[in-house]
Structure formats: C-alpha cells, structure tokens
C-alpha cells in the first residue's frame, strides 16, 4: 500500500507491504525487496561533493527511513538506455546523515533499474561519471501552458523530464501553469544541429 502526502511543497511517500517480497512503487518506480514499511522522499544533491568525486547526478537522491523490519535490496529506476552503453558509467551514491558519501557498484543493472543490496538506509541515488559520453535516455516531454497575462500573452513551457524523475514533483515546481498531457514516453539523444534547424 502506498501513501503520498505533500508537506510544504515536499512530497513524502510511505510504502507499506503486507508480507515479505518484491514491491514496486507505482509513482517513483523504486522497487523494494522487503518486509514491513518504508518512508521516503527526494532531497537535493550536494553537487559540490559529487563534483569533487568526479560524479554527477543521474537521477533523484532519495532519503529513506525504514519503518518496520527490513529492506535488503533496493532497485532504483534509471533513465539510461542499457543497449546504448549508457549504464556503463553508473554507480550508486550512499550519503550518510553526516553528509559523507561513498559510491557503490550496483549488484546488477537492468534496462530499467540499478539494483543494490543494502543493509541500512539513509540516502541513495544514481550517479554517473562526469566524463561519461553523452548517451540517449528515456524521457517525457511535459508541456505547461500559462494562462494569458494582463497583456493577453500566453506562454507554453516545454520541460524535458528524465523518466526516473517523479512527474508530480515537476508539477509542484510549475504550479502556476496548466499541465497539458502528452502520450508515450520517448527516447532522447544528442544530435547535430543543421543551419536550417532541421
């Protein structure tokens, strides 16, 4: 069972499992091998600390609190495309309460998740080498329409959101706009520009 609440523009998720097993959060895509419950939310990365280690974020940083029993494995959703080599440069940052950071190699990397065996909780997030080549990712394009202003001008904001970022958090940041739904997720890759913009 999943509970989501919004406190001071910060989303908290509480995931409660009826028995031992593998459970996936339908909002964040996280998978827990666990029994009991967990409370979690996204927090800001310390980019300075990441940069000192030659890393950059490759997804959200999650802060966890284990409510009951234990979680022994965590599957963090990634947006990299495995077959394109995007997963070759991934690691998982484990950030402790005193803000020290260690980088862990995944137990396994699949097309959709980075799998990590864990013994305790704090903060975990996927990182990528700073010098890693640019590779395609899975993403959503979000359209935000701002209603006419006093001069009767409207604005359409386009946001490219990596697939491993919670869409509800993007909606919180664009609260003064009307979200326009679009269809399927897409694959985004770097291409060269032409003079005509084609």
Image (cartoon, rainbow, N blue to C red):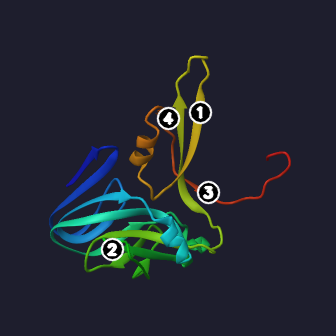
Q: Considering only order in the chain, which callout, 1 or 2, is on the residue closer to the N terminus?
A: 2
* Count of all numbered marks drawn on residues in the image: 4
As helix, strand or loop, the secondary structure at mark 1 comes to strand
Q: Considering only order in the chain, which callout, 2 or 4, is on the residue closer to the N terminus?
A: 2
Sort mark 1 into few (<14), some (14-19) or many (20+) by Cα contacts within 10 Å: some
Give the label on residue 180, or none.
4
Q: Considering only order in the chain, which callout, 2 or 3, is on the residue closer to the N terminus?
A: 2
**Residue at position x 59%, y 33% from top?**
156
Report the front residue among 73 and 111. 73
- The answer to whether residue 193 is above or below residue 146 is below
- Screen quadrant of the N terminus: bottom left
Q: Considering only order in the chain, which callout, 1 or 3, is on the residue closer to the N terminus?
A: 1
As helix, strand or loop, the secondary structure at mark 2 comes to loop
**Residue at position x 59%, y 75% from top?**
85
Query: In the rendered structure, are the residues bearing label 3 and label 1 in contact, judged by CB atoms less than 8 Å apart?
Result: no
> Which residue in the structure is indicated by mark 1?
156
């Amino acid at each position: 069972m999943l509970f989501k609440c919004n406190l001071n523009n910060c989303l908290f998720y509480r995931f409660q499992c009826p028995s031992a097993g593998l459970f996936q959060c339908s909002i964040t895509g996280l998978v827990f091998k666990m029994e009991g419950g967990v409370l979690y939310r996204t927090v800001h990365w310390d980019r300075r600390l990441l940069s000192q280690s030659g890393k950059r974020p490759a997804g959200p940083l999650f802060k966890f609190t284990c409510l009951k029993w234990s979680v022994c494995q965590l599957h963090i959703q990634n947006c990299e495309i495995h077959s394109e080599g995007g997963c070759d440069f991934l690691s998982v940052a484990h950030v402790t309460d005193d803000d020290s950071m260690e980088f862990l190699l995944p137990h396994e990397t699949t097309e959709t998740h980075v799998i990590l065996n864990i013994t305790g909780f704090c903060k975990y997030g996927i990182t990528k080498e700073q010098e890693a080549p640019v590779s395609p990712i899975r993403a959503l394009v979000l359209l935000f329409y701002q209603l006419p202003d006093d001069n009767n001008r409207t604005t359409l904001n386009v946001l490219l959101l990596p697939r491993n970022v919670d869409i509800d958090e993007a909606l919180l940041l664009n609260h003064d706009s009307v979200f326009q739904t679009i269809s399927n997720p897409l694959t985004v890759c770097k291409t060269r520009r032409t003079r005509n913009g084609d």
